[in-house]
Image (cartoon, coloured by chain):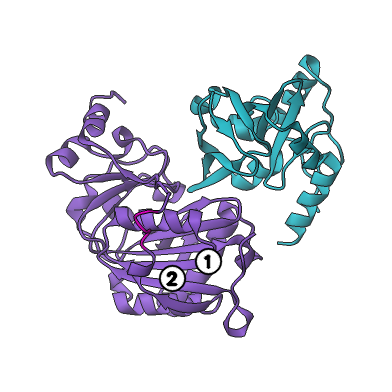
Chain colours: A cyan, B purple
Amino acid sequence: MALRIWASSTANALRLSSATGPHFSPLSRSFSSVLDGLKYANSHEWVKHEGHVATIGITHHAQDHLGEVVFVELPEAGGSVTKDTSFGAVESVKATSDINSPISGEIVEVNSKLSSTPGLINSSPYEHGWMIKVKPSNPKELEHLMGAKQYTKFCEEEDAAH
Amino acid sequence: MATRQVARAGLPLMNIVRMKGVPILQQLEVEECLLRTSSENWCIINDGTDKPNIVMGISGKPAELVEISPVLEDKIPVIRRFTGGGTVIVDHGTIFVSFICNKDDVADVQPYPRPIMSWSSLLYSQVFQGVTNFRLRENDYVFGHRKFGGNAQSITKNRWIHHTSFLWDYEARNMSYLRLPKRAPEYRLARDHLDFICPMKDYLSRSEFITRTIDAAESHFSVESTEFEAVKPPSNMKFTPTSRLLTNQELEAAGNTSI
């Protein structure tokens, strides 16, 4: 598997992230776009659980495979999400692709910047490209998600199979 | 996980639905319903739609893509569809082909836009083999440097649709309803629409194209014919399609928007 090269904007975003919040570090040389400390779904969304709120977005792997994101469709705050069910979509390269929630809960905040700057999902998938913040209704669902090492292996196996 | 239906020679089953003249909005509603609620593979072929319609992608803005005044004056319907991609004007000269697949039944194709597009181009390379210089160029099907087929997709967790509108023939005057989009393929080179597109009728008859497409599908799937009436969503089905007709009020508001 070829080494993934950090986009400079993503690297800068991570340095900013570690200065302002919990420290996240690249995990491995072969998949340095996976962050330790997050949880991951097999549909390539990530979850950052801090206190009573979980932030959700799509991974570097997903944005890389999707291509340039030109449009994002997100729900409104106050609605709810259900584990493994679509809550929105991104448009890239003539395709709409569902975004699936890794957990269930109430949407407490939506990233309004994505309507004017959908490319944040490509340039900063783990920070400025976050999509929704959710109050988890069943925190145990987080236990069934992958950790960074497991997700890295999952991505490698998925890419190798095609 | 969808149940895999396997028939001839271990190939996954695909239902072929052939239609003629079905309204494009109805076709889109059926396709989205099959994508979201069915666990089977489908190939929908609509040989021409009943009347001219403008069809935009999910993020399409009419003010940018459509000549609002003539569209309103001539009462041309404008639809926003559930898939991504650009804007087309379709009519009786358009042939629609849509593939709705379980990702596990096309297992060598990653469920992302570019691999699916590449898979489709290989299938259509079979269709046009020996006919002329067909290729996928950026995200369009072209003969040489002229586009004759536009593509769009929608990808869910376990399934995807790749659908194409083929310009078997078209009326030049209808193209004047469309504006040059902001996001145009590089190979278009700012050409006027009529210099950018070409009709398929110069190369294949309608029936031959459809036959060749089904033959190409048979190299990937075990195909069975299904009647259109059998795939129409029942009235009691709890599914709301997202493709919709824009209202005159929406178009007028777009026409008043300064770009």
Which quarter of the figure is the C terminus of chain B placed in? top left
Could you tell me residue B44's position as x and y percent? 40, 66
Q: Is residue B146 above or below residue A63?
A: below
Asked which secondary structure carries label 2, the reply is: loop
- Tell me the number on the disc at residue B133: 2
Residue B63 pos. (x, y %): 29, 33
Q: Which residues are magenta?
A: B232-236
A34 left or right of A101? right
Residue farthest along the top direction in this orientation = A20
Picture residue at 74% right of the left edge, 62% below the top? A161
Identify which residue is drawn at 30% across, 45% down: B79
Q: Residue furthest left?
A: B73
Q: Is residue B191 above or below residue B170?
A: above
**Who is closer to the viewer here, B169 or A51?**
A51
Left or right: where does residue B249 sit relative to residue A67? left
Of all chains, the one bearing label 1 is B
Q: Please, what is the dominant secondary structure of the magenta stretch?
A: loop
Quarter of the N terminus of chain B within the rendering = bottom right
- Host chain of mark 2: B
